[in-house]
Every structure is written in C-alpha cells, then in structure tokens.
Image (spheres, coloured by chain):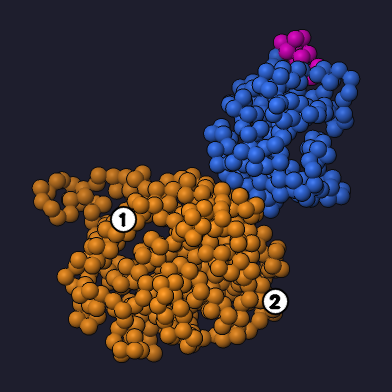
Chain colours: A orange, B blue
Amino acid sequence: MGPDDTNLPRSVGVATPRRLSFARPLRLKSGATLDAYDLVFETYGRLNAARSNAVLVCHALNASHHVAGYYADDPGNIGWWDNMIGPGKPLDTERFFVVGVNNLGGCFGSTGPASTNPRTGKPYGSGFPVVTVEDWVEAQARLADRLGIPCWAAVMGGSLGAMQALQWTLSYPMRIRHALVIAAAPRLSAQNIAFNEIARQAITTDPDFHGGDYYEHGVVPKRGLRIARMLGHVTYLSDDAMMEKFGRALRSGKLGFHFGIDFEVESYLRHQADKFSEYFDANTYLLITRALDYFDPAAECGGDLAAALAPAKAKFLVVSFTSDWRFASARSREIVKALLDNRCDVAYAEIDAPHGHDAFLLEDPRYLALVRAYFDNVARGVGAERPVTTGAALLDEGEPLRVVAGGGFAA
Amino acid sequence: MTEHEQLSGRPEFDTIAGWVAPEATVLDLGCGDGLLLKFLTGTRGVKGYGIEIADENVLACVKNGVNVIQSDLERGLQGFDAGSFDYVILSQTLQAMRHTEEIVLEMLRVGRQGIVSFPNFGYWQARWQVAVGGRMPVSDELPYQWYDTPNVHLCTISDFERFCADHAVGILERIVLHAGRRIEFLPNLLGSLAVFRFEKRH
C-alpha cells in the first residue's frame, strides 16, 4: 500500500461491538447506585505504544456506540458518524484509536431500562435510575481505565455528545487533551426543556406505557415514541432545509380533504417515526431527554459559566451551525466566552450551513476540513502524526458480540 | 531562513512584537491566517486570540495552531468584557472596516492599549498617482483596483492622528515604515505603512 492509498478516505470496514462488565457500584448524581452494569462499545484503529492516541466519540440522543464501519452480518447498518471517522477521514483511524460507547441507560446493549435488574430478576423499567451527563462521563472514565487509556487525546461529540466532551474537561481535566464541542449548548433553554417535556408527555401518556414497566406487559408505547420522534426530528432541521426538501409538495398531487397524509412532509415524519419506534426504547428516550435537561455545569457556580469551566485544562474546538435553532450559535458563543475568560485555548467556527442542528452529522466541506485540520494539531501534540505500526494491547478487550440484521446481538 | 524570519511575514510584525509586553494577553481583530499571533506567541509568549470572519482564514488559523473566534467585527466586540485584554490589535484591517470609529473605540474598551497598522494613503506614490496620473493608486500596500478594493476607509498618517485627537485617543508610539525600513523624515510622504500604539486619554 503506497502513501497515496492511505490518504483516500475509506470505511473502517467491519466493526465488532464488545461488552465489558463492571462490578464496582457506580454512585450516581441523583444519589442512587447502580450495583453493576455493562457497557457496550466499539473501537477502530490501533492504540499506539504510548497509549496517547485514543479519541472518545460520545453519542447524542438517539445514536449508539456504532460510530463507524458496518457489521459483517448487517452490512447496511453503517455507523452514525461514518463520514467523520475512518482511514483518511477527518478523524483518521490510521493515526487515532477511536472508541464509541453506548451510554448507561441506553438501548443498544449497555445496561439500561430494558436490562434485567439483578435485585428483582425483572427488567428495570421504571426502576432504572435517572442518569446524568456527569454519570456518563464517570462510566466512560471507568471504561478508559479498563481499556488502559490514561488520557484521551480528544473527546468529541455533537449536541448531547458535545456536552459529554465538555463535562470531561471538568470531571477529569488531566485525562483529556482536547475537547471537540460541536453544535452544543452549555445548558438547555426553557424552550429546549419544553420540547423535551412534550416528548416525554407523549410517551408517558401512551396507554401502553404502564408507568414505564411495559416490558412485563409485552407491549411498547409506540404511539408516544412516534410522536416524540416526530417532534424531536423537526427541531433537528431548519425551516429552510425542510422547505427545500419537501416544500408543500402533495403526496397524490391534490388535497384530500381528510386528515390522512396529504403533504410529503407528513409522510416523511411518519416514516421516520415508524422506523424509530421499531428500534428505540421509550424509557431510554425519557432518560436521555432528562440528562439533557439536567446538564448545567454553571448551576453549581451560581450560573457563572466561566467559574464553572475554571477547572478545564484541555484545548477546545467549538463549532456551531448558523441555521441550528435548537442549539443556536449564540449558545456556543456562551461556551467560547467562558473559555476565553479562563484563557483556555479555543478555536471557534460558525459554519454557515443550511441544515439546522443535524448539520453536525452531514457533509459540509468547510466543517470537515476544520475538524481534519484540528485533528492534525491533536496528532502533533500526542505523537500520532504517522499511522500506528507498533500498537499497545488493550488491558481488557471485552467480550466480542455478533450483531444480526434487524438489530440485537446473537450468541 | 530562520523560523523567526519565516514567521515575520509582514514588515510590521517586528514593530508590534517590540511593543507588546512578554506574556501579555492579545486580541487580534481580523487576524487573517493567524501568523501575527503565532509570531507574538513565539517571540513574546503572549496569550492570544484572533477574530476572523472568513471561513478560509479560520481554517488557516487552526492549521497554524492559533486560537481563533469566528465573528463579524462590524458587529463590534459584544462578547468581550471591558479591559479584558492587554492589547487589542487591528493590523491592516482598519481601512477595510465600515464602522471605523466604533471599532477603534471598541478596541479601547476591551483592551488597555490598541495597536493599528494601515497603508498610508499619504505616501508620495499614492499622491503622485492621483495628482499626476489622475488614477486611483495601486501599489504593493494597496494592490487593488478601485472597483474591487475591500478598502473603504483609506487614510493618511495625518488623518489618523487627527482622528485620535478628536476621539480622546492618546497616541503612545508611532512607527512608519517603507520596504521594511523605518522612515523618520517626512513620514506621511515617504512612509507606506504606519503602525500606532495608543490608549484612551484620561
């Protein structure tokens, strides 16, 4: 393979999720304790001998540990940030060892509401404790310990993932060199919380919800989950992007004078909702929206974000998108201002992209070029300029899992 | 070429570095590719941030490992607290600003001192091109044609000094250059580039 070949962006190829079990109880911010838990994760690339090239990628509301590549038995299931991560891509897995993890409370294999509660032998359901961004970071730190990663070269995320990256710089300032905080907010606004509350109401008032213990009833609160998804989806897109994509186009070319599907946008939303309600867990949706609501590092400093960010030692890349109204650029500028007040190193870009909040997942050449350039700096700082040749073994690789088509793991 | 020479890309870099106290905090408005900040960090150990609006320049700053904040200077320095920087620099940007008065006053709100550099429109060649040639000046410092220039507020050294006097801005130092050399004699006629350091007059 010549040097030119390695520069061509390509997929990481077949990904293998792995599971690690943690026996040490995790005390949560709420005061509750998880006695034991599993985390499911994927890794791409190789950890270098100095163990200095590891990058943690944090997921947002509805994604998972499956960040890049595809599954041998489910090749259509491509990682959610595959355009960002891979050999020759902005986060280059030839140089960096990338970790994606499904957070606690999730529904993609890590311990969550659908998992069996060892104390009762039944699914946790309503008994699963409310988890916070701080709790997730704590669990991620324990994962790093088990893998043998003393310090992340970078922690990266968009939206709620960006909040985790930011929290890392506060919880473990000495274990993170760079934070990539993309399409973020330092805390939710009243409007943001209001949208989350409507989504939760949709779920909890679904007759199939059964107070969160629907597993035992063999049903799923699909109607509520569908509405939650539709609502959420609208907040991820800009008005312009929706108008561009759907306009007022009619499904059958004329008005039907009924309440079925007239407009293309209705059809699209229903389709998204159907897909989502097939694979996502309603309790996880409640938990993750609550984690969003509760994230507010400034709260402990009387609302002073600059004081809250004082512990941060990392260097930052902050990126916002001008058409994002969910977490508008002004919200990112609050973070930048607080970093500046602390004289932290920061690069802040405001990408003039039309797609709204979802822009952080899409292909914008300016955005991707920026992340690529930033990771070049990260690489220089941690001795990861060249592809990893002699790697280090992970302390604990975890148990490999086989993913089957349609979701879920096979034995 | 030494690293110093490589970094010292523009003639005023050395002048500005000579004025900036070691370890100072610096805000560079319209920082371009960030090379001035990189130079000041390398030579004076400053903690610097640039403000830049153009996507390609923000990217260049990241490539140069310089702190940069993408923002439109024409909207002022709203996000910046009063007196939060030792120096606010406006290097070769003054003449391209629409809100010239506002930005100079903003510089002195946010910074304890301001530093500007700009092409001197009083340089004899510029005067000659207008007076004798009857054409708008085009030179190394002013490489644009009248119809494609970003420069909307060109001024002479005397104009800027008058501006300072009228706006309670006290000039601390002035260095006038041409072709990288300092011009002491008839600077408004023989100098093509002016660099000023100033503060709010009390």
Chain on which label 1 sits: A
Q: Which residue is label 1 attached to?
A: A195
Do the CB atoms of the residues marked 2 and 1 lie less than 8 Å apart?
no
> Looking at the image, is mark 2 or mark 1 nearer the viewer?
1
- Residue A56, disc: none
Instruction: From the viewer's side, name the closer residue of A323 and B115.
Output: B115
Please tell me which residue is depicted at 25% across the width and 75% down the height of the picture.
Answer: A212
Q: Is mark 2 on a helix, strand or loop?
A: loop
* Residue B156 in sight: no
Q: Which region of the structure is painted magenta?
A: B123-134
Instruction: From the viewer's side, name the closer residue of A62 and A27.
Output: A27
Give left or right: position of B70 versus A67.
right
Q: Are marks 2 and 1 on the same chain?
A: yes
**Residue A327 position within the rendered picture, expressed as x and y whole percent measured from the top left:** 43, 52
Q: Which residue is label 2 attached to?
A: A50
Quadrant of the rendered image containing residue A220: bottom left
Q: What secondary structure prevails in the magenta region?
A: helix
Amino acid carrying mark 1 in the image: Phe
**Residue A405 position within the rendered picture, expressed as x and y whole percent measured from the top left:** 35, 78
Please tell me which residue is depicted at 58% across the width and 69% down the height of the picture.
Answer: A172
**Residue B113 position within the rendered picture, expressed as x and y whole percent measured from the top left:** 72, 35
Quadrant of the rendered image containing residue A385: bottom right
* Residue A258 in sight: yes
Where is the N terminus of chain A found, in terms of image quarters?
A: bottom right
Chain on which label 2 sits: A
- Per the image, is A232 magenta? no
Please tell me which residue is depicted at 50% across the width and 71% down the height of the picture.
Answer: A137
Where is the C terminus of chain A found, in terms of image quarters?
A: bottom left
- Per the image, is B129 magenta? yes
Q: In this view, does A344 lie above or below B49?
A: below
Q: In this view, does A337 lie above or below B28?
A: below
